[in-house]
Amino acid sequence: MDLATVLLFGLAALASLFMAWVIGAGSSGATPFAPAVGANAISTMRAAFIVGILGFVGAVTQGANVSEAVGSGLVDGVTLPPTGVIAVLLIGAGLMAIGIATGYPIATAFTVTGSVIGVGLALGGSPAWAKYVEIGALWLFTPFVGGGIAYGIASVLPRQSVPETRSVPILAGVVGAVIANLEFSFLAPIGGSLAAGGARALPIGATASAIATSFGVGLLAAVVVRWDVRRDLHGGLRRFLLVLGGLVAFSAGASQVGLAVGPLLPLLSEVSMVQPIVVLLGGGLGILVGSWTGAPRMIKAVSQEYASLGPRRSIATLVPSFLIAQTAVLLGVPVSFNEIVVSAIVGSGLAVGGAASVSPRKLGVTVLAWIGSFVLAFVLGYGGMAAVGAV
């Protein structure tokens, strides 16, 4: 390993840290607690502080899947060199920084994915069509699935025929059952998740044990939330909303860190002294600092400029956000948290206040920014590496 390789890896690592900071200041830091801030359940600065810590924990404990997909799953037949990694990260971070400065939430997943594909194809790689189909399907269906679930929840919560002392605990039970099946690196000795651990501990068969564990965790969550909302409805809704925000923040770190550090992973074979966990720690730290220093502006933009959120509508927004985010982590697919949360906000808004509760202009500009960021990132990545190759 020569000095030039070490220096290039160092530059790539700095670019990765900058990208992680931008992610923390933008999508990962802004969107998870934006509904809770919009519902006046927590202050902007406190939300930025908490989301930074939870994002760091999520990055370290669940960040490997998406990181591997971004690092080696988007283009076949080629490994990005240090110059390519630097180009990818600077393009993605630059476009994200523009979004932060203008107040429009540029989708991180779109910019990084577009630049990785562009750079990889310019270097002679071939398209990974199977992965593109998987990614495209998730991106395409996220607004409909997330918005649809949010619309359904927001439509049910205000009904007198469905008391919140019943409906909210049911939602908590579903969330608890999902938590039992989340895979964490520190649970690897027992199968990676609480459900897998239950499958090993209970003598009733693997599938039945996993189901029983999931049901037990879900039931416990439902009972606790039911007790809380029955004794203090307003306070119970607020506390459940904050828990959901924390879960989404954790999931954001798990998913978004891969966009920052994923391109670095193929380089680790050349710099054997650096382990993947160190890269994840660095990415998580960058997200934490970005959340603390740059997220408040975007939290305000998402929570106040898209629609007026109350606690019930915010719960309707965060439940599908958490479910979709963890689905993406499980599949190892890069996903935009801006797309997830904004779609859910729109869905819940349509249920509560109709079209008048959502800003069509703001929404339209945001969608165009998402599409444009992917196309621009691809063009810059491909064109930039082609120009470097020609020189």
Image: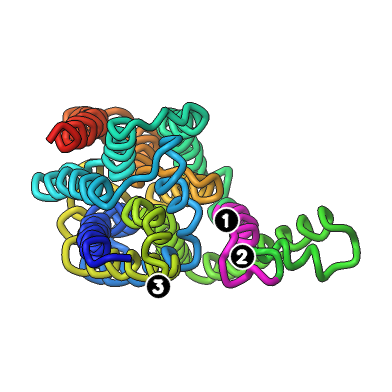
Which of marks 2 and 1 precedes in the sequence?
1
Residue at the outermost left position: 101
Which of marks 3 and 2 precedes in the sequence?
2
Most foreground residue, 294 or 265: 265
**Mark 1 = which residue?**
175
Taking 274 as reference, is 72 above or below it? Answer: above
Q: Of circles 3 and 1, which is in front?
A: 3
**Mark 2 = which residue?**
221
Taking 184 as reference, is 338 above or below it? Answer: above
Residue 76 in the magenta stretch? The answer is no
Residue 385 marker: none
Q: Are marks 3 and 1 in contact (CB under 8 Å)?
A: no
Mark 3 burial class by Cα count in 10 Å: few <14, some 14-19, many 20+: few
Q: Position of residue 82 (x, y in %)?
A: 27, 52
Q: State the CA–CA distance, disc 1 to disc 2.
A: 8 Å
**Mark 3 = which residue?**
273
Q: Which residues are magenta?
A: 168-189
Which of marks 1 and 3 precedes in the sequence?
1
Q: Position of residue 387 (x, y in %)?
A: 14, 33
At 40% across and 39% down in the image, what residue appears? Answer: 78
Q: Quadrant of residue 268?
A: bottom left
Q: State the CA–CA distance, disc 2 to disc 3.
A: 43 Å
Q: Of circles 2 and 3, which is in front?
A: 3
